[in-house]
Amino acid sequence: MHTTTVIEDGPGELASWLRLQLLPGVGPVAARALLARFGLPPQIFAASFEALREVVPAGVARAILQPPGALANSRLELTLQWLQRPGNAVLTLADDAYPLLLLEIADPPLLLYVRGRVQLLSRPGVAVIGSRNASTQGMRNAAAFAEALSQAGVTIVSGLALGIDTHAHEGGLRGEGSTVAVIGTGADLVYPRRNLELANRIAAQGCIVSEYALGLPAMPGNFPRRNRLISGLARGVLVIEAAAQSGSLITARLAGEYGRDVYALPGSIHSTLAKGCHALIKQGAKLVESVDDVLQELRWTGGAGAAAPIRRPVPEQAGPASALLAVLGYDPCDADTIAARSRLAIPALMGELLALELAGLVERLPGGLFQRCK
């Protein structure tokens, strides 16, 4: 094994790793087969055609024997410049700092581009994931669970997307466990741009990691592949909210394949954002209602306060608002039904609902539905 980051191995070593990463027809699985057969990348490029053919097809073997092209040279120059900035690092499969949990998955990346605290990649973590179009309550749950887990010393892993991911990272930053953002672009880019400020805070206090070469923009195929790293880096995956066809279910499925625990928060049977969580629970995911449930499943002994429950103050309500909340319950409900239950005229009811919405006690959902925030 080598030392901690590629920059210490010099540009020659880095160039060979980058060249291997860029080879057409060579993905992580083929690259690992080549490394297992020949050793480090310089030995791969020094091998004979006959020896290479024992591992890869003839076309790939010929590509390996070609001299590095302009793309590889420009990528090396860009990467060397990026590595000069404080906090940036590149890890290879041969580095001691490469996270051991990723070595357990079928296709660990050859290279990891890292901004921030590299050591967080090897700390015990829980992935907190869910819908981009999350409900207000779902985002509150993501932040609260992530904060409590982080305060217990667990690192929060998520994908920097809008919705649940964003609030999971925010919660993680408020505890000693901090947070790791696994992104689907080059590590020198931020997607979505709305999370630029959050990404800068994560790079300063936590860790951003990508398997993609610098400068690579967001592309649809990147994100399903990114999901395998989210589940691979974590000891467990907590799904806060997910629709029936959510990408979060891909991450949860991969977590199960990797032998990780899968946890899911239940929701209303009428909420489309609970369908995915309920499906996971039916398939064997652990139903969780508090951070205690997650920490007990992890057998976590990370320190004092590790089992502290989430407590969030609930505003005192009296009079018509309190009565209306009682009538609304916790399931999504349309205005006509609420009006019939409360015996309020629609104009008066909409005024009351608006006041509750502004107070953060009621959320307006698509389709003209309203839901009480717990």
Image (cartoon, rainbow, N blue to C red):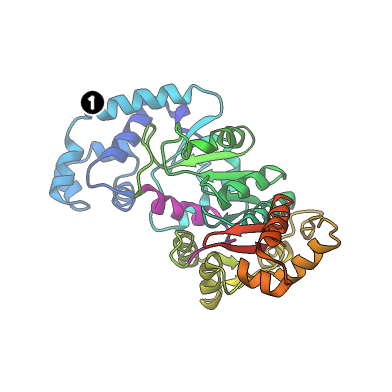
* In the image, residue 93 above or below residue 364: above
| In this picture, residue 319 sits left or right of residue 330 | right
Q: Which residues are magenta?
A: 222-243
* In the image, residue 127 above or below residue 18: below
Residue 65: x %, y % from top left: 18, 37
Q: Quadrant of residue 92?
A: top left
**How many tags in the picture?**
1
Q: Residue at x 70, y 54 (%)?
A: 144
Residue 348: x %, y % from top left: 71, 60
Q: Is residue 26 magenta?
A: no
Residue 189: x %, y % from top left: 45, 33
Secondary structure at numbered mark 1: helix
> Please, what is the three-letter code of the amino acid marked with disc 1?
Ala
Q: Quadrant of the C terminus?
A: bottom right
Please tell me which residue lies in front, 321 or 243.
321
Please tell me which residue lies in front, 344 or 213.
344
* In the image, residue 340 above or below residue 193: below
Q: Quadrant of residue 262?
A: bottom right
Please tell me which residue lies in front, 328 or 44.
328
* In the image, residue 4 above or below residue 28: above
Residue that label 1 marks? 70
Q: Residue at x 44, y 62 (%)?
A: 250
Please tell me which residue lies in front, 284 or 13.
284
| In this picture, residue 6 sits left or right of residue 147 | left
Q: Is residue 234 magenta?
A: yes
Q: Quadrant of residue 203?
A: top right
Q: Residue at x 74, y 53 (%)?
A: 152
| In this picture, residue 30 sits left or right of residue 107 | left
Q: Residue at x 51, y 30 (%)?
A: 88
Residue 266 visible in the current orientation: no
Residue 312: x %, y % from top left: 79, 55
